[in-house]
Amino acid sequence: MTVRRVVPNIQSEAAQESREFYGLLGFEEVMNHGWIMTLASPSSPAAQISVMSSDKTAPVTPDMSVEVDDVDAAYAVMQERGVEIVHPLQDEEWGVRRFFVRDPNGRVVNVLGHR
């Protein structure tokens, strides 16, 4: 399994202010679904930050997202190891397949792959 990118997720109701603040560091908006906005570096597109009010289809807002090349394999490994699954594997309408797990520090990790 290969990690493609890791994105911190900031829960916030201040999307516009966050866009402006991170813009000062060179980030630009690359995605906005209303409830989640992703900002990326134009010179290094995998360097990203997401700002979300709350997750649209999950009961919790994840602390970070990890994109992998095989989300089904990642899900199987987590189940085999007995890791707490916070949100089950599912396909989302915006083109990702994902699930949430809780890491040893209590952080919720959104593990995803693009379809």
Image (spheres, helix red, strand yellow):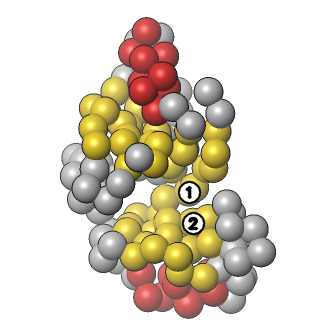
Q: Is residue 78 visible?
A: no
Q: Which of 51/13 is in front?
A: 51
- Quadrant occupied by the N terminus: top right
Q: Residue at x 31, y 33 (%)?
A: 89
**Extreme-top residue of the structure:** 80
The residue sitting at 37% across, 23% down in the picture is: 84
Report whether 31 appears left or right of 88: right
Work out how far the residue at label 2 is from the one at label 1, CA to CA, in angstroms: 5 Å
Q: Amino acid at mark 2?
A: Ile
Which of the two discs, 2 and 1, labels the residue nearer the N terminus? 1
List x then y, in percent, for residue 73: 48, 22
Where's residue 105, x and y in %? 53, 33
Instruction: Give the class, few, some or many, for how many residues have Cα within 10 Å of label 2's Cα (few <14, many ≥20).
Output: many
Determine the secondary structure under disc 2. strand
Position above or below: 41 against 100 = below
Q: CB of mark 2 within 8 Å of CB of mark 1?
A: yes
Place of residue 12 in the rendered image (x, y in percent of width and height, measured from the top left):
39, 71
Placement of 54 over or under 113, stated as above or below: below
Judge from the rendering whether residue 17 lies leftward or rightward of residue 69; answer left or right. Answer: left
User: What SS does tag 1 mark?
Assistant: strand
**Mark 1: few/some/many CA within 10 Å (<14, 14-19, 20+):** some
For disc 2, the marked residue is: 49
- Picture coordinates of residue 64, whole percent (x, y): 51, 50
Q: Which of these two is toward me, 11 or 87?
A: 87
- Please say whether residue 82 is visible from this viewpoint: yes
Amino acid on which the number 1 mark rests in the picture = Pro
- Above or below, 4 against 50 in this view is above
Which residue occupies 50% across, 70% down?
A: 38
The residue where tag 1 is placed is 8
Residue at 47%, 43% (x, y): give it.
Answer: 113
